[in-house]
Structure formats: structure tokens, C-alpha cells
Amino acid sequence: MVDSKQKTLSIFMQSLMKIRRIAEQSFISPIKDGGVTLLQNQALLHLKDHHGCTVGELSAKLGLSSSSAAQLIERLINLDAIKKTPDAEDRRIAHLSLTKIGLSQTEVAHSMLAEKVGNVFSQMPEKDLKEVVRIFTNFLKKIEK
């Protein structure tokens, strides 16, 4: 029985990795056409939901070293996608926020994702879609603990 469960978990993990790979490949070209890389887009999406987060928080969220995060942030500033504001009380801390250009980029990425996902799920019966949502919601709750 343990072998069966391990085999099922292995298939599930392989499926998740394949979904991620397909999703990334589907969005790399359109995102690059918009002038940003996939990693830059992930940073912009994080900043959309976490306005004013610090450089360290963004670095931790994206799993980047301090120097890699600094380079990423500098590129986004040069693209006028984000702005960096020093903390009023501690000049060593900087807060990041989206500019209008950065917000526009996140909206483009979101609409591309919504269209792609919508096309896939529109072919699925509503009952199955609800089951997928239920399973993934529970899965996310467990791994975020």
C-alpha cells in the first residue's frame, strides 16, 4: 500500500512540474515581447500584491541572493516599472512599489494567464473544475503551513 501511495505522489509531483514547465513556456515569449523577463514579471506580480515591500522581502520571496535581487530591482527601475523609496526612519531600508508601467505589465500578464487558463478550463465540466479548485486549495493550505 505504501508503494502505491508513493507511486501516486510521484505521478502528482511529475504532473505539477510539467504544468509549471508548460505554463512558463507559454508565457515566456509574450512576457519578453512586453519587455520583461519571467523573473522580472514575478517580481512585478509580487509587488502588485505587496505594495511597499522591502528589498529583503522581495529577495526572500523570489529566493534570490541580495546581489541578484539588487540587479533585478535595478533593471526594473531602469524600465520604469518600479520605484524605490528610502524608509523614513531607517535609510538602510528601501520600499518598492509599482509604477503605472509596472502595473500595466502585471495586467497584461494577468490577462494572458486568464485567457490561457480559461481556454483550458472551459473545456472541463464545471463539476471537475470545482473538484480541481477544492483539491488545489487544500494542497496550498497544507504546504503554506
Image (tube, grey):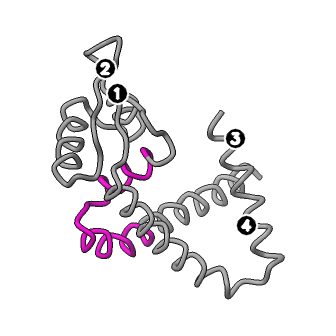
Query: To which residue does mark 1 refer?
Result: 56
> Which residue is painted at 69% across and 41% down in the image?
142
Front-lying residue, 4 or 17: 17
Q: Nearer the viewer, mark 4 or mark 2?
A: 2
Query: To which residue does mark 2 refer?
Result: 93
Badge 4 crowding class, 10 Å Cα cut-off, few under 14, some 14 to 19, many 20 or more, is few
Query: To which residue does mark 3 refer?
Result: 142
Q: Answer with mark 1 or mark 2, whichever residue precedes in sequence.
A: 1
Query: To which residue does mark 4 refer?
Result: 132
Magenta region's main secondary structure? helix
Q: Answer with mark 4 or mark 2, whichever residue precedes in sequence.
A: 2
Q: Amino acid at mark 2?
A: Ile
Measure how far apart labels 2 and 3 are at the Cα level: 32 Å
Q: Quadrant of residue 145?
A: top right
Q: Answer with mark 1 or mark 3, whichever residue precedes in sequence.
A: 1
**Contact, mark 1 vs mark 2 (Cβ under 8 Å):** yes
Q: Nearer the viewer, mark 2 or mark 3?
A: 2
Instruction: Using residue 87 as the reference point, say whether residue 23 is left or right of it.
Output: right
Span of residues in magenta: 22-47
Measure how far apart labels 1 and 3 are at the Cα level: 25 Å
